[in-house]
Image: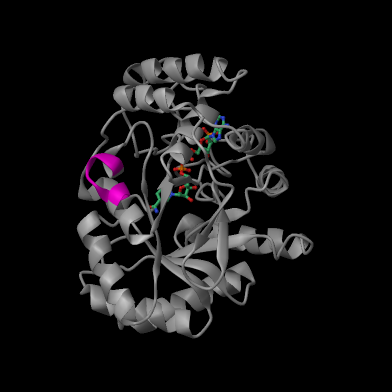
Amino acid sequence: MTMVRDSISLPGREVAIPVMGLGTWAWGDRSTWGMDGYDRSYGFETIRAAYERSIASGVTLLDTAEMYGNGESERIIGRLLREDAGNRDRVVVATKFMPFPWRIPFAGALMNSLRASLERLALPFVHLYQIHGPISFRPARTVAAALAAPYHAGLVKAVGVSNYSEREMRAIHAALAESGVPLATNQVEYSLLRTMPEADGLLGACRELGVTLLAYSPMAMGRLTGKYGAANPPQGKRNFAAFPMTEIEPIVSELRRIGAAHGGKSPAQVALNWLICKGAVPIPGAKNAAQAEENAGALGWSLAPDEVAALGRIAKFGQRGLFNRIWQHG
Ligand SMILES: NC(=O)c1ccc[n+]([C@@H]2O[C@H](COP(=O)([O-])OP(=O)(O)OC[C@H]3O[C@@H](n4cnc5c(N)ncnc54)[C@H](OP(=O)(O)O)[C@@H]3O)[C@@H](O)[C@H]2O)c1
């Protein structure tokens, strides 16, 4: 059995996160995830149920961004936390600043964005504040100085980046260190349909630097859950890991086979457990209680090393490219 941890301490000010979080891009989003659009089964009440089931299962890390639903994801989280005062102190909130090059002056724009996020979230601070992508065209030192200011002011407990390559991550890690701020996380697309972070050395560099890798789209935007196939591909603009379902079906079959050997674990649970075994923290999205409950079933057990290796052999390297890394705003 591979040993897995229950929680991870982020460098920063006493922030502990569970080994799996909950992604909230879909909360309030219409074009990709169909809220008030193509997905008629999905709305605030099902989101509330997903939240409650996740928190009850120990999945207390919520990942959001100012971009998600134009702030609606943060507003929904703010409402959920206001209505759930009993759990408010258990919940760890991670949000993101989108560093468009035209947002100037950079440090001032970041601080204004953070304050707007805090207002929507109705929180005095966030636990983790992330730069959404390496798209500001500014030196690492400028970005680091902008992140260090709210950290030193106590408005964020830890800082991270997203969609950073190994080279970009090493540069921001070093620049932050000059300001006395540790880099806590790098959030990148990582799944059985995108193993690039381990193949290109990013995961190894994270281990070396003490940076936690947060794995986004860990079920390839739903494609690895087993509910989609060539005859019923997912709806919406699901651009990450957008391989034809015919290429994905053999991987889902293998997830099913391995899950059966673990007492009937589902493809989603095996796909998420595989990432946890790799030392990454997956942040799967959930739109309702059933999805949240199923995803929480990835916790508390572990794939055998030979199963982890076998899945790695049939996994896909993934798609590279500026569009894939940045412009979907996921
Ligand atoms: N930093 C970045 O640039 C970036 C980019 C992308 C995502 N993210 C973060 O990563 C999080 C997760 O990624 P993601 O939402 O793209 O993809 P994902 O977690 O791979 O897939 C989530 C979707 O799969 C479906 N699903 C979830 N659990 C299921 C289950 N148990 N059974 C069946 N279907 C299930 C749901 O959609 P349907 O029911 O509609 O199929 C759900 O919205 C995001 O919410 C966001 O926080 C960050």
Magenta region includes residue 169? no
Report x, y in % for residue 320: 22, 42
Q: Is residue 130 left or right of residue 301?
A: left
Whether residue 62 is visible: yes
Residue 12 at x, y percent in the picture: 48, 71
| In this view, 306 is above or below 36 | above
Looking at the image, is 208 positioned above or below residue 270? below
Instruction: Name the quadrant containing residue 46.
Output: top right
Residue furthest to the right: 86
State the residue at coordinates (20%, 59%).
167
In the rendered image, the vertical position of residue 110 relative to residue 288, given as above or below: below
The colour scheme used to paint the residues is: one colour
Where residue 82 sits in the image (x, y, percent)? Answer: 73, 65
What's drawn in magenta, residue-wise? 198-204
Residue at left offset 20%, top offset 69% = 137
Percent x, y of residue 241: 34, 35
Residue in the image at 62% along x and 34% along y: 291
Q: Determine the main secondary structure of the stretch shown in magenta.
A: helix
Asked whether, in this view, residue 322 is left or right of residue 133, the answer is left
The part of the image, by quadrant, that contains residue 141 is bottom left
